[in-house]
Amino acid sequence: MKRTLDWNKYLEKAAETVSEGIVMLKNDNNALPLDPSDTISVFGRIQLHYYKSGTGSGGMVNVSKVTGIVDGLKDAGVKLNEKLLGIYRKWDEENPFDQGDGWGGEPWNQKEMPLDESIVEEASSVGDTVIVIIGRTAGEEQDARLEEGSYLLTKEELDMLKKVRNHFKKVVVLLNVGGLVDLTQILECSPDSLLYVWQGGMTGGTGTAAVLTGKVSPSGKLPDTIAEKISDYPSDKFFGDKKKAVYSEDIFVGYRWFETFAKDRVLYPFGFGLSYTKFDIALTYAKSSDNESVISVNVTNIGSCRGKEVVQVYCEAPQGILGKAKRVLCGFAKTKELAPNESQSLKIIVKHRDIASYDDSEGRSCWILEKGKYTLHIGCNVRDSIGHHDFEIDDDIIIEQCSQALAPVEAFERIKAVETADGLSHIMEKVPLSKVDEAKRRLDKLPEEIAYTGDKGIKLSDVKNGRNTMNEFIAQLSDHDLSCMIRGEGMGSPRVTAGTASAFGGVSDELVKFGVPACCCSDGPSGMRLDCGTKAFSLPNGTLIASTFNRELAEELFTFMGTEMIANKVDCLLGPGMNIHRHPLNGRNFEYFSEDPFLTGQMAAAELKGLHSVGVEGTIKHFCANNQETNRHFLDSVVSERALREIYLRGFEIAVKEGKARTIMTTYGAINGLWTAGNFDLNTIVLRDEWGFDGFTMTDWWANVNNRGEEPKRSYYVPMAKAQNDVYMVCSDSSCVDEDIDSAVKNGELTRGELQRNAGNILGFILGTQAMKRLDGEEDTVEIINRNDGDEASDEPVVFYDLDNELELDLSGVKCQKGKNHSFAVIVKKQGWYNVTVTASSTQSPLAQIPVTIFAMGTASGTLTWNGTDGKPVALSCEIPMFSRFTALRLYFAQNGLDIKSISFKLVREADNMDLAFAEEND
Ligand code: BGC
């Protein structure tokens, strides 16, 4: 099939998403939309470095151009105070952006320009309105912190806010952040307008400008509750421990806690967001049957400009025996853009499974609707209701009987809601503990072995075409073939698109001979990470997308994304990320959607539908409870089965059942003592037996695995395979013999039947991929039109060089113009730290600064800066880590004027294994 990807339309759709995801919290004094006759002063150095996303795998998309807020405003014709902009530019040149070094090395904030009162005073004489941009990034391996420059504002930022407030009539504050920051300090400075503009990808500034100028009325709603203080969040007491995260808040995450027990601690409630116009919402119809309730509303724009509104439905269930949160989101719908006086009726179907509770008490293990009165509150946020619909359930209804799974093995107490004479209160109760014999459970479900036939000449395409069964195909695979199949290769495997996260499927010559294609996985949730420097589209982050509350928009955006994946021969995106915002300081919240599992599941399902519509896949991650970055490889989440089922698994369940997810990534950490990568209850009982998942699962990259009671370790394939987590991501050579698997099969610890079952999951998935079509010469082709950045994906293969202790490459002839990259890849025989020497010359002045940044696997690993060299070659060196057998390297030239000659690599220290490498990196 021939497909067309119109880059302009892609940009437009992404900008539309940004506009719809911006959440306006405050707008007084007619500060917004901007007055077209005003000249706007923009403060905050991040105006020159718009954060398109956070850091780490979810943010490493190479883009040709990022349209920041200032560019967006200029493109929209807004008059800016150019003199002030010039002052910032000059200061920024003298105080360059600190991108940090290494994985997760970028600081969470950038030094702010100290402000002289006279600059502010002068700016205020040019116009009435000031925009202040506060920026924060965050990402993998580190959480945000309750410190200045992270969750709290720095002294310079506060000083800036105070000074502009003193001098300007209208103060607009924009938060270009991935997660929440402290608002109390900002509100004390009394801005007129305050907006979370989040991180909007490469076209974030365009979407932001559309809102600021009034072209689009804001319609984003908060996907998280904003409380006064971090300590108000129910998980705060239990967050940040390096070994164990005890989830004592249980189901009371975010608004479930605040609306039930601490309403007065909330600054802005969940689901809240202002518009430039006003809406009237009228409940027109409501009816409940056994399985669902149908709500109809009529929404009328009663203001004076066009806009969209989100109608939200929250359930208040009877407290029953279990105790409940007072509000649970169970339905939402967004209007189209309504003109003043225009109305639209919306129908919202609330499935009763979405308002059921999970009873994890001994012997129960079921989804239940406890008897009593149910109220569905209808409104435009969790608090402001315009009406409600009540219905009564006379007797308890067990909606679904499950079996106990993933329950805690150590005693702890959790919060429980109880009704007292004085109203609702909370107590601590003991958490029900696991009674499951996990080993027996696995043995009871051992798959039957398919007798080995050897090569019968059956190719995978014969299964696709119905000539043979999958079992007949699998019967031909030797134990070794099967052991290769469960190990993905990467990062940067030459079997697939260069610079991507992994190859799986056809990872050995034998498997390729059987007609199994190598399929390609690439990060991440908001655009493809192509470490060789290939440019890709950078999309808005997950939190922004959730704030749109617009499923159709997310689906459309990801249809573009999917088409771009086909153009780059990527079969699985490593996203959407869908962990719950349990705590505002989690470093990866930007990748994830919300504190609410229903919203999370719905948005993930929408993105998946978009990807599926063009025949590619999204890998939902991280399954599950990946809610803290600090010590994430070793963190044990101690959590009740109820909280898992209702909060931390729920989004995934929706993505599997409604979004038809077919690939899942487990986490780095453990749930109740067992690392998720080898967790049978998680990967088999819940995911497959209960939810009917029929795709394949993978580990996170170099994840730890254990058997119950053991210390976890990397590349521990046997417990992973037994748990039916199908593919270990990643190893450096999937085709080699693995003695552990070999002996486990020989001694019966792991059965051939289990390996065949896992292979069946992987192969069943591969049948529907573009990679399979490619093998048969039937792949879809993509013509990209209107991409005017000159960065079309090139068909030129990336060259791989062997690096055995030392390597020198001649780079003369490489063009070093400003903004260009030179990419290649090395196959590293000995993983470790290498001294890299680049030799180059320049005829520029001795004061010129000409930096070259070396990116290894997409991470800035060192910057070498030349001055003028009188045309003579000068060698500069730095040390960079090369831990992956395949390392994509990229030299980025930030300035003109360099003539590069060569690059050489010399091993300095070998890393015995990944553990050591990781340990040193994280020191
Ligand atoms: C992250 C994953 C990511 C993987 C591959 C890991 O560090 O946790 O989310 O997909 O790397 O880049």
Image: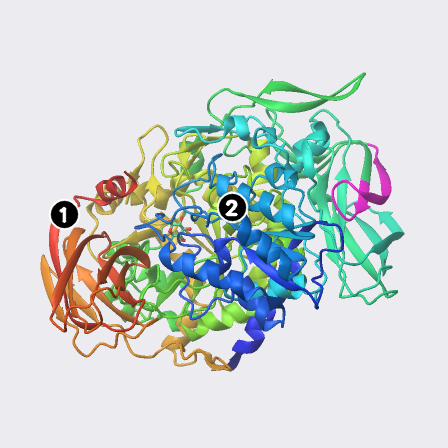
Q: Is residue 624 visible?
A: no
Tally of numbered discs = 2
Give the label on residue 371, or none: none
Who comes first in sequence, dot 2 or dot 1? 2
Task: Assess whether residue 386 is covered by the magenta stretch.
Answer: yes
Side of 72 relative to 318 (left or right): left
Q: Which residue is mark 1?
A: 910
Residue 795 appears left or right of 811: right
Give yes or no for residue 158 being in the magenta stretch: no
Main SS, magenta region, reads strand
For the residue pair 10 and 133, the one nearer the viewer reads as: 133
At label 1, the amino acid type is: Glu
Give the residue drawn at x 88%, y 52%.
282
Q: Amino acid at mark 2?
A: Asn
Q: Can the viewer see residue 377?
A: yes
Q: Residue at x 51, y 82 (%)?
A: 786
**Which residue is labeled 2 in the image?**
589
Q: Is residue 560 above or below residue 189?
A: below
Q: Nearer the viewer, residue 361 or 148?
A: 148
- The part of the chain drawn in magenta is 376-394
Residue 879 screen position, x and y as percent? 18, 52
The secondary element bearing badge 2 is classed as helix
State the separation of the CA atoms marked 2 and 1: 35 Å
Location of the C terminus by quadrant is top left
